[in-house]
Image (tube, rainbow, N blue to C red):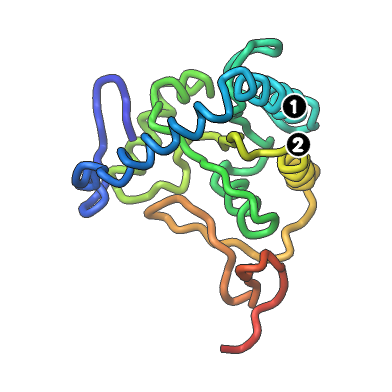
């Protein structure tokens, strides 16, 4: 939990995860720059603008969804932070992953003061959340869900996200119960319900063993 005047650190080993220099990442960055040069910036910019417009407009048109950040019509990257009314951001992320095989990020995205301002939280609310973190309970941590598109994202990918978000927003019951881990705040499908998602992205009951 990060504020402008105070930080509540995670317990080790998470707090020590700065790690060694990302040599592999540096090599990969060079390869990515070469690949981007081959595609060409005009094509990339056109793709970003097209997917950004589709992502932001689609989310804003979905009942029960609030998009945070730039106002409609802003020329922005194809990245959208949003909330679904009545559903915790961590649960939205868990359901998108387990039920729809869609990966998103949730939380405050390393921008805690900005997110708490966008969410309109009072100093008293923030202190209450901070107190929970101090006691190892992150179940009520504020945040949002963030979906993003890359060069390989297609309109079909965005359509799939919008359908899934609308499904959750309209209150469609989950086919599995979820349990929340107090220490991380994340939700996970309850193993007791016997539900799993296999590597072929097929949803169904887990078989014994």
Which residue is at a point 29% across and 20% down the rendered structure image? 4
In depth, the one of 183 and 209 nearer the eye is 209
Mark sitting on residue 11: none
Mark sitting on residue 155: 2
Q: Are marks 1 and 2 in contact (CB under 8 Å)?
A: yes
Which residue is at a point 43% across and 30% down the rendered structure image? 33
Which quadrant of the rendered structure holds the N terminus?
A: top left
In this rendering, would 173 be left or right of 103?
right
Q: Residue furthest bottom?
A: 208
Which residue is at a point 58% across and 29% down the rendered structure image? 39
Residue 123 on image: x %, y %: 39, 21
Q: Which residue is mark 1?
A: 54
In this rendering, would 89 be left or right of 107?
right
Which quadrant of the rendered structure holds the C terminus?
A: bottom right
Q: CA distance from mark 1 to mark 2?
A: 8 Å
Whether residue 54 can be seen here: yes
Corner quadrant of residue 134: top left
Residue 28 on image: x %, y %: 37, 41
Label 1: state its secondary structure: helix
In this rendering, would 7 be left or right of 171?
left
- Vertical comparison of 18 with 63: above or below: below
Residue 102 on image: x %, y %: 64, 50
């Amino acid at each position: 939990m990060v504020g402008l005047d105070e930080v509540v650190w995670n317990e080790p080993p998470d707090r020590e995860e700065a790690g060694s220099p990302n040599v592999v990442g540096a090599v990969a960055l060079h390869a990515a720059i070469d690949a981007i040069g081959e595609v060409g910036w005009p094509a990339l910019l056109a793709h970003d603008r097209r997917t950004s417009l589709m992502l932001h407009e689609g989310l804003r048109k979905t009942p029960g969804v609030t998009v945070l950040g730039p106002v409609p019509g802003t020329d922005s990257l194809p990245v959208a932070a949003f909330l679904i009314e009545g559903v915790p951001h961590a649960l939205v992320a868990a359901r998108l992953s387990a039920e729809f095989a869609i990966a998103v990020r949730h939380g405050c995205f390393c921008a805690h003061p900005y997110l708490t301002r966008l969410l309109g939280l009072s100093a008293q609310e923030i202190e209450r959340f901070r107190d929970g973190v101090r006691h190892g309970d992150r179940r009520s941590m504020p945040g949002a869900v963030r979906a993003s598109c890359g060069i390989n994202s297609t309109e079909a990918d965005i359509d799939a996200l919008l359908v899934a978000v609308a499904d959750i927003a309209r209150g469609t019951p989950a086919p599995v119960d979820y349990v929340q881990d107090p220490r991380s705040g994340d939700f996970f499908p309850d193993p007791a319900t016997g539900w799993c998602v296999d590597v072929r992205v097929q949803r169904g009951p887990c078989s014994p063993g």
